[in-house]
Image (spheres, rainbow, N blue to C red):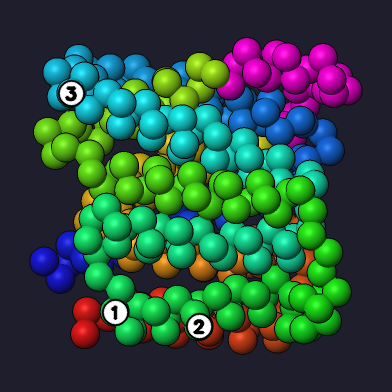
Amino acid sequence: MQQSKYLGYLCALLAVSIWSGNFIIASGFSGALPPITLAALRWTTATVIFFPFAYKYIRRDMEALRAYKWQTIAAAFSGVTLFNTIVYISARTTGTANMALFASTTPIFVVILARIFLKESLSLFRAVGLAIAICGMMTIATRGNLDVLLDMTFHIGDIWMLVAGFLWAVYSILVKKKPKEINPYSFLGVIFLLGVIPLIPAAIIEQQFHPQWAMTPAIIGATLYIGLGASLAAFFLWNTAVTIIGPGTASLFQYFMPVFSGIGAFFILGQPITTAHAIGFVLIFTGVVLATRSR
């Protein structure tokens, strides 16, 4: 039981580390690719590569998938079609500090919904740990400068981030409630396929309102990373973590995202790691350790 719990922690941490690279790519290519197109490329890549492997499991689990069809459709729509697309839209309409501030609400949404629908308890340790982790995330986002928060102006992208956080909470709850007879491969294969279908025509329409873009080697590499890494590998790891330790606990590890993003930006973009990163990491680590204590 204890080993299984640590496996859940590891899966959540690995998923978050991969997603951190996704945010670097989303920021770096926001001017080169429109948001829906970026999401469509991402999920088309993941679906085309993964669906042939998942097909035999889908055929075997078809009866259970039909019984859970509305929840599966909701998971595909919230976790695949909308969540990342809305994050990409938000990145074009608000600043990094604002995104971090409103992204910090995602685990709060998850904890609240897990309490309502899964009866997960909200202990004093979890509440305090959540608050400390939020402080750590904001320390990194503001680089330890309170004036950034005081001078912050709000944009439409901030509302998009709130919507994205709520959708991710819904997705995480649906993953936890998935019947055990549905294999993880069949579940992922179906939500990938159902989720990407609306994105393709939406991306075609989007092309009419944005400048033309070319499939450069850089865009191909980025698409492969977010398609295979941030979609296929990270979603499998996240779903495994949610199944083992629950959505409320798994969501706490999302506060490590700015830590991994900072490390990635240091190696890829040459951005410095500051004292604020170190303090933020200590706060986040302390918060997550407190929040995941059973007593």
User: Which label sits in the foreground, 3 or 2?
Assistant: 3
Residue 273: horizontal and vertical position, in percent? 71, 76
Please say if 114 is above or below 72.
Answer: below
234 within the magenta span: no
Residue type marked 2: Ile
Kindly identify which residue carries mark 2. 132
Q: Residue at x 73, y 14 (%)?
A: 205
Rendering quarter of residue 268? bottom right
Q: Which residue is mark 3?
A: 67
- Quarter of the C terminus within the rendering: bottom left
Is residue 217 shown in magenta? yes
Residue shown at 77% from the left, 40% from the top: 29
Q: Are marks 3 and 1 in contact (CB under 8 Å)?
A: no
Res 230 visible: yes
At label 1, the amino acid type is Ser
- Tell which tag, 1 or 2, sits nearer the viewer: 1
